[in-house]
Amino acid sequence: MTDLNHYQTLQVNPQATQAEIKQSYRRLAKVYHPDSQHKEANHEHIVELNAAYEVLSDPHKRQSYDRQLRHPSATAAGDWQQRTKAAQKQYQKQRKNARDTDEQIELWLHQVYQPVNRLLCRILNSLEDSIEELSADPFDDRLMEAFQDYLKECRDFLEQAQRYFRSMPNPAQVASVAASLYYCLDRVGDGINELEFFTFNYDESYLHAGHEMFRIAARLRREAQAALRSVAA
């Protein structure tokens, strides 16, 4: 394919209209793109298609190229060859950067987001049942002790989640996800503190405040999930 001129690369004749050139480029790009399922997929072919389309889709560049085809010279041929090689290198660099970024995001999701999200679920999803059990008689020592055990377990889960969160920096592409998780963990910590104050003095204002902190944390967790979906899209 490297010995073909741009018209041959795009499989159009020199009199092709701009619409025909665009249509042929799109058709061939789907066939040769490395991410396609076609057996002909080849990133070098994509680079050549891009180089050809860059010239033929621009009327001024196309006129200049047509003149070179009518009056070829070794210098012109060498210039186009160098441009194609430069385009290949740039494409390969972009592909590598994209793969590296994808790998970093995948690693962060596996080592940070997923374990943090699981631990947050264990904390947030059990609050209602724990409060309901305690509400039967907050002054019952057995029930209060069970509630205190629940809060200790929440504190342990929170510390684990914070360690996971700090274990590696987040890629820039998931910054909004990480920000929502950070504030979610912060609200969970505030909520646990408020609930623990209640166990000391039975002041229900602390119980309500802790419940509200957990509600906010649950919303922030959902926001992290939504932000992650937008990244994946």
Image: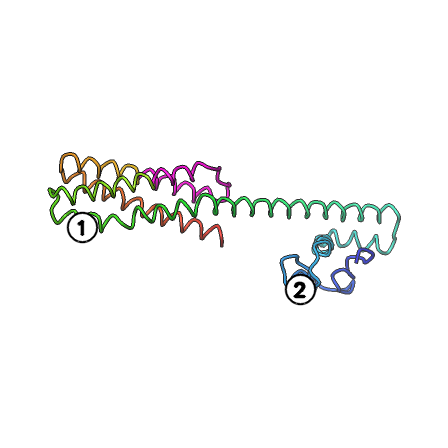
Mark yes or no: residue 56 visible.
no
* Residue 200 image offset from top left, x and y in percent: 16, 34
Mark yes or no: residue 68 visible.
yes
Distance, label 1 to label 2, CA atoms, is: 58 Å
| Residue 191 position by quadrant | top left
| Residue 3 position by quadrant | bottom right
Position above or below: 205 against 232: above
In front here: 170 or 166? 166
Q: Name the amino acid type tagged 1.
A: Glu
Compared across the picture, whether 143 is left or right of 187 comes to: left
What residue would you read off at disc 2?
38
In front here: 57 or 182? 182
| Label 2 element class | loop
Compared across the picture, whether 173 is left or right of 66 comes to: left
**Label drawn at residue 148:** none
| Label 1 element class | helix
What range is drawn magenta here?
158-187
Q: Name the amino acid type tagged 2.
A: His
Q: Residues within 10 Å of mark 2 (few under 14, many from 20)?
A: few
What residue would you read off at disc 1?
132
* Residue 117 image offset from top left, x and y in percent: 39, 47
Compared across the picture, whether 226 is left or right of 103 comes to: left
